[in-house]
Amino acid sequence: MTLLDELKAAREKGVAIGHFNFSDLSVLYGVATAARAQNVPVIVGVSEDERAYTGVYEAAALVKAIAARYNQRLYINADHTHIFEDAIAAAKAGFDSVVYDRSDLPLQKNIEETSRAVRELKAINPDIYVEGEIGNIGSGSEVHETVPENLDLSTVEEALEFVRATGVDGLAPAVGNMHGILHSMAEGKERKHLNLQRIAEIAKAVQMPMTLHGGSDTDENDLRAAIKEGITIVHISTEIRLIWRKALEAQMSVYKNEIAPHKLFKPVQDAITAAVESKLRIFTFSK
């Protein structure tokens, strides 16, 4: 079963597939374990920076090995790829999908570059899922002091023009979402909210899988409503990074003299698993 097949099935069921970024084994194993426990498909992502650390072929090989060992529906995505050559490298390494993100460009230039990427990636692997992005939701999976400037909402007209001209398999629009979180969110004082009407309008127009980037610390009711309106993939990164760091700091504060990484990181993996299970239940409306 390809990722395209999984997304078609998710749309028919009215649920979403979770996407979680990783750059170390504790997060990768934590995400995979959580998805196996719930018997649901899951996507693990590695951005350009993360792939520079893990290695492109190495990351793909790890994910494929876990999927094969457990007969698990585990897919790997080249997240937020801005450089054409990096997108090609990911496809050749066996990635299931590529987010080719040129949303920093004017719409017509974004269309031109994304169209080229779709053609070349599909020539390497016709089943690869290629996602394009429009609008501005900020950058960086981190904790921000203030809301990034110039955030906007994608319009239905932009979305239609983009998907018709590029031939992408899926679309990531700006619908009130934001990369990273604010300090107030990290402290549990605030949650992100989405423009549900715009999600519904774009989903009705494009009739294809839609991705919510920057899903960390989004209000749970908004997430459920967004999925019902047409969101098919939800990206969570910053929340997972915070859990990773806090869990590791807790381990190191208790076991000050421990130098064996596997002893420190196993509880970190367990913390990731618990967090991902919670998110997956939201995406599939399970209790």
Image (cartoon, rainbow, N blue to C red):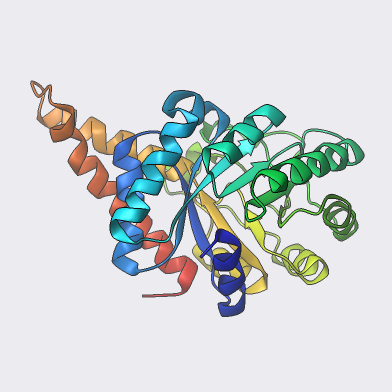
Report the residue that reaches farthest toward the bottom. Answer: 13
Is residue 283 shown above or below 178?
below
Between 71 and 254, the residue placed more toward the observer is 71
Where residue 161 sits, quadrant-wise, is: bottom right
Front residue of 56/195: it is 56
Identify the residue at image location x=23%, y=49%: 270
- Residue at 52% in and 43% down: 94
Asked whether, in this view, residue 204 is left or right of residue 40, the answer is right
Asked which quadrant contains residue 195, the reply is bottom right
Please tell me which residue lies in front, 174 or 37: 37
Depicted 32 relative to depicted 202: above or below: above
Asked whether residue 14 appears in the rendered view, the answer is yes
Instruction: Look at 53% across and 60% down and name the residue there.
Output: 219
The answer to whether residue 139 shows anywhere in this view is: no
Quadrant that contains the C terminus: bottom left
Residue in front for this viewpoint, 168 or 26? 168
* Rendered location of residue 237, percent (x, y): 48, 43
Picture residue at 33% right of the left edge, 50% below the top? 66
The image position of residue 4, as x and y in percent, is: 61, 62
Q: Position of residue 42 (x, y in %)?
A: 45, 58
